[in-house]
Amino acid sequence: MEIEKKTSGDSMELMVPGRIDGAAANQLEVEVLAAIKQGVKAIYVNLAQATFLCSAGIRVLLQYHRQMKGKGLKLLVTRPSPEVASALEMTGFPELVEP
Amino acid sequence: MTSELELTLANQQAEVARLQDQLEAFARQHGLAESALHEVQLALEEHLTNILSYGYEDQREHLIRVRIQLHGPELLVEVADDGRPFNPLETPAPDLSKPIEARPIGGLGIHMIRKSVDQLKYRREAGRNILVMTKRI
């Protein structure tokens, strides 16, 4: 699985397609950590092409959402596919999605 | 009409991806709706991850048998593992009412399995955990 990255100004968009299983969640964490190290102010995780989001993926999103928020920064999910929206809804984390 | 996909997986994460690839091919072949397929894939991912992470007390190779059957309007997914006895149906539901900052990060997988399929049945038989998930398609 390929995570595509787009930087614009202080923010970075990560596009994660396909199955967000345990391995993809680890890959996403590596990219999020790299973006944080680069000093971006906002990370947008575009999940428009994700077919499902497992709990390990939610854990990565939640952990770095909290960490970024604590520093006055942002990590949010953008354009969730219906399956991703449903996974965030059923676990009670719709706040992770960009309003 | 009944169609079946049966696979024996070793207890490694890469084997779960192999199962997911085959399940996608099976679903395409039988014209299953994408949304139902993705919900079943999520439930399988969570259940197998739990088995791989918490099921075994030794470092040996273990085999997990997965049988997927299409029975008219239902997809039956049976997973049999020889890990420690574990009935996921006995796990309490997480408290989703707490604010996002106060919630524990773990314990979501079984909740997601429950929400993704229509019926769950568990039994312990001949030293194996057998979980049967039924999904209306």
Image: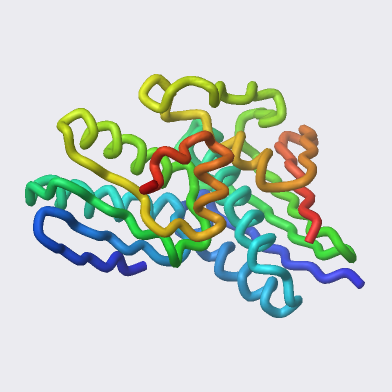
Query: Can residue B110 be seen from the camera position used here?
Result: yes
Colour scheme of this structure image? rainbow
In this view, the residue farthest toward the bottom is B29
Residue B132 lies, in percent from the top left, at 77, 45
Q: Along the horizontal axis of the image, is A52 left or right of B89?
A: left
Residue at 89% across, 65% down: B72
Residue at 57% across, 49% down: A86
Residue A98 lies, in percent from the top left, at 36, 48
Is B112 situated above or below A82?
Answer: above
In this view, the residue farthest toward the right is B1
Residue B118 lies, in percent from the top left, at 77, 46
Query: Can residue B60 be seen from the camera position used here?
Result: no
User: In the image shown, does A16 or A23 lie closer to the viewer?
Assistant: A16
Is B56 situated above or below A81?
Answer: above
Residue at 56% across, 21% down: B95
Total marks shown come to 0
Q: Residue B73 sits in which quadrant?
A: bottom right
Quadrant showing the N terminus of chain B:
bottom right
User: In the image shown, does B55 or B47 lie closer to the viewer?
Assistant: B47
Residue B5 lies, in percent from the top left, at 73, 67
Q: Along the horizontal axis of the image, is A98 left or right of A64?
A: right
Residue at 39% across, 38% down: A59
Q: Along the horizontal axis of the image, is A23 left or right of B61?
A: left
Quadrant showing the C terminus of chain B:
bottom right
In this view, the residue farthest toward the front is A99
User: In the image shown, does A18 or B69 lie closer to the viewer?
Assistant: A18
